[in-house]
Every structure is written in structure tokens, then in C-alpha cells.
Image (cartoon, grey):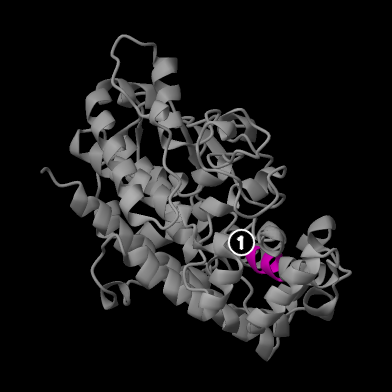
Amino acid sequence: MVLLLAGLATMQAMAWENHSLASYRAFENMPEVASAPSVTVEPLEAFLRAEEYTLEALLASQEAWGLTSIEKYPARPAELAFKADPGRSDESRRLAFLRALRVAPDSRFALYTQSDPWNPTSGTRLPSAAVSTQTEATGSGYRYGALKSGELVAALTVLATATGEPDLGLDIHLFEDSPSDWGRVYGFGPQPYGNPAVAQDSHIPFHSGFMHESRLVKLGIPTVRRNLILLRFHQFSTLAALAFRTGHAYWGWRFAGLSLHYLQDLTQPLRAALVPGEPNTKLLSAQALALVGLPGMKDELVQLRSNRCLVVEKYQSELLLRAAANKQETALEKALRNTDKDRGYTDWSERYMRDVVSLQSSRAALALAQTLTAALPAAFAADAGFDLAARETGSNLLSELIKRDSPERNRLDAALAETMANFGTHSRNALRGILRASDPL
């Protein structure tokens, strides 16, 4: 029973479309980052060559963790295990590493920076294709700069840049029904939700986590119980700790940023709740009707929810970009930097993403959906015939929304500020956990 969920996943492909914009603000005043020395840029191949044997052990331990810690975990095929082989080529070693992680083997892992729009840097610009296998979203604000091996770069730049990297193609077409050679050998099984033929749909199972849906929904749509987002965080966070411990600071910060991307996705309430604002009985009824050839209710749910999700993501991104362009700090920047709540949560542990981040977001999802619906033009919230994603007027519509001065728009801004505060707080708490794990054993 995945039909309805397949459609509903599609509309979430844009969530938090440029993590780096928010990450610069979340970490720029964090002492552990701000006072960290600049690091020496190192190609991935050099790190892998130097740490082959420690990586073999770590990647084996990651697989053991997945088998015991993730519900419905799809075991990695034995032939994909990373085995140290100092005699092989750098290219072969890199491919073995990517296959052991079960990420797309054409992932770039380029040496690059994502520019901070508040402090843009000069230097050689890179085209999107140099760092990503995916077509860049219109208005995303991505600006890429080239790095060279041996160059010094600020830890903040490496960390913030890497928080955007998983959206550049790492999790594309990884399932057995995907149109890729690697999906058929990775062992993840059929794609649990989303359209396998659509690239951006195919990464959603790694970037969402419906961990707190009702028992009824979990019974009716059991695929929501698979939480591969937890796997990705664990993989990259433990790689970060290893890199720090073994003297590869550049990859320590970069793997840390990669891992934080997945946690940050869960701070978006619409990533943690399947259909906020709609009763479970309606969701399951739409599912049942679609299965017998009556998809009307499902299509309406998908379209309305798609519009709401897309506009809130673009609205948030545009607010951050406008603030940077005008050098005018807003409530979002202040919320991202605010550390007042950092110590108000339980100490970091491997349960933090599930028991703190995901739970908080799922509880906030209904209120956010209602606030968003009240603030939007009627077509966005109630017209199933209006497809925002298919129109090129999205940016203009958002500009109009920004100009509106109403209680509803003010409540939406306050809700986004609260969400950005959670983004910053949980990102810093997770980084503190990674840094503690990096201490020499």
C-alpha cells in the first residue's frame, strides 16, 4: 500500500532547498566553529588512501549498527563491503567507498565552496555540473567556488557548504526499481515511496522520516516505518569523527556537514509528518480508492499539499536571500544564531534525531500547515487545479506574499522563525555530539 504515499512524497522534493544559507548563520558564532583553525583542503582520494584499514572497520561497524538500530533495515549485500586494498587505483578505491556507503557512484565530491551571501568571496566560479549531478532549482541561490588541494579554508565554510551537499545527487536512484545500474545491486529493495523514475522523488526516502505517525497509518502504509534518514546521519557523522581523530580536519568538517543535512531535513515539520491537517481516515480512504482506480481524492491531496510545501520552502529561502542582499538582519537570522535553547534539550545521543528532532517537528506540522494555508492566496490553499510547481510565476507570487502585511503573514513569519531556531539549535547540538565522539579513544 504505497500508492498515496508515492504521490505525497513528490511534493516534498524541495524541502530546505539550500541548507548552506541557514547553516552559515547557525554556526558562525558557535565557539567550536568560529575559533577552529583553517583546514587544509584534501581530495577524497587522499583521505581514502591514507585511512583504508580504519575505514574498513568503520564501515563494517556502520552496517552492524544499521541492522540493530533501524526498523525494516535493508541489509547491505556482502559484496559491497569495503575491503582495504592498498594496491588498487584511487578511482577503484573511491568507487568501493561510495558503493559501501550505498550512495550514487557518480556523486561529485568536488573540492568546492558554497558562498555565504552575506560575505561573498571572489575566486574561480564553478558551474553547477561540476559539483552536482542534478539540475539546479530556479532561485536556489547556490553559488559555487573552486578549491584546490593544499589550500587553506575556514572550518565554517567547509561545514556550511557540506550541509547542502546531499541534495546534489548523493541519494538519487538507489532502489532496485530505479533507472540506474547501481540501484539494482545496492540492496535497498523497491523504492518505498515516490516515483522511482523521477530523480528528485528517488532521494526522498533518505531525506524524510515519518517516525511518529499513528499506529493506524503505520499499519495501512507500512513503508512509513523505514527511516533511511537515520542511516545517512549515522554514516556521515561517524566518518566525521574518524576523520577528525586521524588528522583529516577538512574531511572532519565536511562529513560533519553532510551528516547534519539529514538532521536539518527533520527540523522541517513537513518532512516529519505525512499529511498534516488531514484526518488519517481520509488518507487511508484516498489510498483505497486509488487502488481500485479512483484516484481523484488522492490527486487533490497531492496537489494541495504540494503547493503548500513548495511555497513555504521558497518563501523561507527567498527571505534569507533578500536579507543577505539588503544586509538587513531579520527574525530568521536572529533565530538561527540564538543559542538560548541549546542546553534545554537532552544530551546528544543516537536517539536524539528520533526522540527530539522528529517528535518536535511532527507535533509542529499541523499548526504550520494551518498557518500557511491562512496566509496564502486562496488558489494555493484550496484550488486543486492550481499547480504551483508547473508555473514559472512562483517567485513573483512569493514576492507578493512578502509584501502582504496581515496577521496571517505575521504568524507565518513567526512560525518560520521558530522552525529556524530549531534548525540552529539541533544542528549545533548534533555537531557537539560529533566533536565529542572525535576525541581520541
User: Would residue 139 be found to the left or right of residue 338 on screen?
Assistant: right
Which of these two is toward me, 121 or 278?
A: 278
User: Would residue 1 be found to the left or right of residue 266 on screen?
Assistant: right
The magenta segment? 308-313
User: Would residue 430 be found to the left or right of residue 121 on screen?
Assistant: left
Q: Residues within 10 Å of mark 1 (few under 14, many from 20)?
A: many
Residue 214, percent across and down? 52, 77
Query: Would you say residue 134 is visible in this rendering?
Result: yes
Q: What secondary structure characterizes most of the magenta part? A: helix
Q: Amino acid at mark 1?
A: Ser
In this rendering, the answer to whether 30 lies above or below 145 is: below
**View extreme (bottom): residue:** 407
Query: Would you say residue 117 is visible in this rendering?
Result: no
What residue is at 43 percent from the left and 74 percent from the top? 359
Quadrant location of the C terminus?
top left
The residue carrying mark 1 is: 317
Residue 21, percent across and down? 52, 55
